[in-house]
Every structure is written in structure tokens, then in C-alpha cells.
Image (cartoon, rainbow, N blue to C red):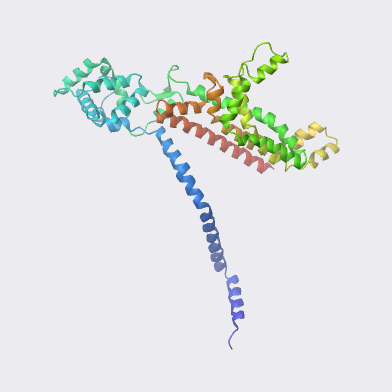
Amino acid sequence: MAIPSFLRQDIAMDTTFDDPAAIQRSMRASQRKKTWRALLLVGPLAIFLLVIFVIPIASLLTRAADNPEVIETLPGTLQALADWDGHRQPPDAAFEALARDLGNAKSTPAAGKLARRLNYEISGYRSLIFKTLRRLPFPATDAADVRTRLIDLDKRWADPAYWAVIAGNDTSWTPYYLLASLDLKLDAQGSIVSAPPNTSAFQAIFSRTFIISAVVTLITLILGYPLAYWITRLPKRRANLVLICILIPFWTSVLVRIAAWVVLLQREGLINSALEKIGLIDQPLPLLFNRLGVYIAMVHILLPFMVLPLYSVMQSVPSTYQRAAISLGSHPFAAFWRIYVPQTYPGIAAGSLLVFIIAIGYYITPALLGGAADQMISYYVAYFTNQTINWGMASALGLILLAGTLVLYALYRKISGKELALS
């Protein structure tokens, strides 16, 4: 007897559900469909970020170790210096190879790049290279005569230190920029040593950057915590109005806000004029082009980044916890400190991390409102990029700043993970 079609379907379904392997295959197929659907939705954005953001930044950061100038411009010289001990004068063949390599690079962009790269390690090397290029080519003579002509041209060619710089750049990758950005260098034996105190001060600049960022983060937390707490206690309509007032600075250009602070903080500005009129001061306070002006403007700009994470966390904390603690005999302040504040730790951590990470990358505010001793590391990244065209040094400073940011983020993730586990 023939089985009806609807019964055949039910039998097939029962058979499928009785087969674990078939169930697993069905689940895997369903999961693959969901994965592909998610990839199709996220794919365009991921490709956009990869092409516009990730690849350009990654290619720029590779310049922190890129070292093509010497190896491409002086290949013969490097070959002649391969067995040189680095202490005595190099052999005659090295002088001859140098004259030949520089002669080939004469009147090409490679000569300028080589001179600039060598000048990073020994000041005055650029003038030496161009002085030699102007006298090349020498008449066809032997290698010993080339040595004599180069030394007669400039006594610095007799100094092994100048040749050691060339010999030390025999690879297309170098740690020079990364070490220099930390006030370090390689000595003649290849060991990492501290750079002379008068040649660099990047450790002090990094310390200044992190100190300014930490102070700004602390001030925004002190101001933002009670503000966010007050907003959570307002009726919803008034709370939304206060939040709009906090968000208004986001709709104003940073340059406009900084220009406004210049007007307010200058010696004849509104703040000093008001303080003098009410008799609090006899002469204008120095509020501009110093660390105080930088702090004031940065706190004003970054305060919303602290308030919003705090408000979002505080809004989810039930107010009944505090009332219950007070009803059980706890002092209101103790109830607030021991019951309420620990529940806002995620907001404190998120807001502090957000403000600190944004602050360490600030450039315009310290440049316009601070003095020479108030500039942060971003100022020097811009300096090496736009003025000295030292892309390697700019990339090295940016890479170290990025590494520090990632370490802070990893530390935040670790701490927040422990907090979630304890809760």
C-alpha cells in the first residue's frame, strides 16, 4: 500500500532527528549561512577600514625601521667595508668604492636622501657628502690616490667614526629611529647605550605627555563624577536638557573653542578683567601659554568623554541599594562610598581610559595654548613630518605612542575582566 506524501515527510523528519550526524550537518550548514550573512553585512565596512585606515597606517609605521638610503646608494662601499674592523682607517678599496658610488648618485635624489640619513647620526655629515659630490668625479687614478684626494678634500674622511656610520647601515632595516625615540643608541660594539644628554630629550617628552594626560584625566573625573551623578538624579526631561548642554561642544570646532579660550585667558581677557574688577587680583594672572592654560582647555574639551560613560553606568545602578543600606543603619556617605561607588567602577574605568587615550594624542591645544615646555609628543611627530621630513623618526614616535596606548587598553581589559569575574 502506498504511503501518503505527508506521512513520508513526517517519517523523513523523524529519521533525521534520530540521526545525530544529520543534526550536526544541519546545524553546521545553518551556522555557515549565518556566518556568510554576517560577513556580507560587515564586509564593505571592513574593506573600507582596511584600505583607508589600516594599510596606510601600517605602511607608515614600517618607516620606523626602514633604512634603504645607504644600502641602495653605497652598495660598493658596503661591500668594501664588509671585513673592516671599525677602528682603524678603512682600506683603500673602500675610498675608491665610495668615490665611485657617490659619483653614480651625483645629481640624483638619492644623494640628498643619503646625506640627510647620515646626518641624523653625525651632525655635519650632510655638508661632507655635498662637499665631496661637488668635487667628483676624480681623475682616473689608483685607490691609494683616491684615499689621498678624499682626505685632502676633508679631514673627516680620515676619521673612522664617519665610516662606521656607513658600515653600520648595511641592512634595509635599522633600530636607529626606535632607539633614538627613547634616547638610546647603538655603540661601536653593537650594544644599546644611552644617548648623550644634549642630543635628545624624548624620554622627558614622553613623561610630560603622560603626566599631562594623567592630570587632565584626574581633573575630568573629579568634575565629571558629581556632574554625572547629579544628572541621574534629575527628572528625565531635565536630564536630557543637561545632556544636550554637555554635548553642545561636540558641535563646535576644536579650533573655535581654543580660540575662545585664548580670548578668555589672555592678560586683558575676560577672566583677568573680571577678577581685577571684583578686587581678587591686583595684576593679570599668567593663564595663557603655560601648563595651566593647557589643562583648562583640555579639561573643557574632554569633559563630555568622561561624563557620558559615567552617566550610562550610573543610570543602571538601582537607587534602592543606597536606601536599603541607610535603612539598616549605615551613614549616607558610607552607603554612597561602599555601595554606590563600586558599582560605577566600569564607568570610571571606561571614561578614564577614553579621556587618557585621547589626551596623549593632543597636538593643537598644547601648540596654541602652551609654551615650549608644554608641548606633547604629537607636536614632535608633526615637527619631524612637516619640517625636517624625517619620516623614520616621526613613525618611531608614533609607533611608541601607539604601543603605549595598546598596553593601557590591554591593562584596562585585564582589570575589567577581573572585576566581572569577581562580580
Residue 211 is left or right of residue 313, and the answer is left
Q: Which one is nearer the viewer's eye here, 271 or 392? A: 271
Above/below status of 249 relative to 41: above
Q: Is residue 188 visible?
A: no
Q: Which quadrant of the structure image shows residue 17?
A: bottom right
Image location (x, y in percent) of residue 158:
25, 17
Query: Which one is nearer the viewer's eye here, 334 or 271?
Result: 271
Q: Tally the marks.
A: 0
Q: Residue at x 37, y 26 (%)?
A: 190
Q: Residue furthest top?
A: 282
Quarter of the view holding residue 357: top right
- Identify the residue at image location x=70%, y=33%: 225
Residue 109 sits in quarter: top left
Residue 184 location (% of width, % of height): 43, 24
Q: Position of residue 250 (x, y in %)?
A: 61, 36
Q: Residue at x 48, y 31 (%)?
A: 400
Which quarter of the rendered picture does the C terminus lie within? Answer: top right
In the image, 269 versus 360, the foreground residue is 269
Left or right: 82 as drawn, with respect to 326: left
* Quadrant of the drawing holding the N terminus: bottom right
Q: Can the viewer see residue 180 in this picture?
A: yes
Q: Locate residue 284, reporting x and y percent.
A: 64, 14
Position of 79 compared to 120: left or right?
Answer: left
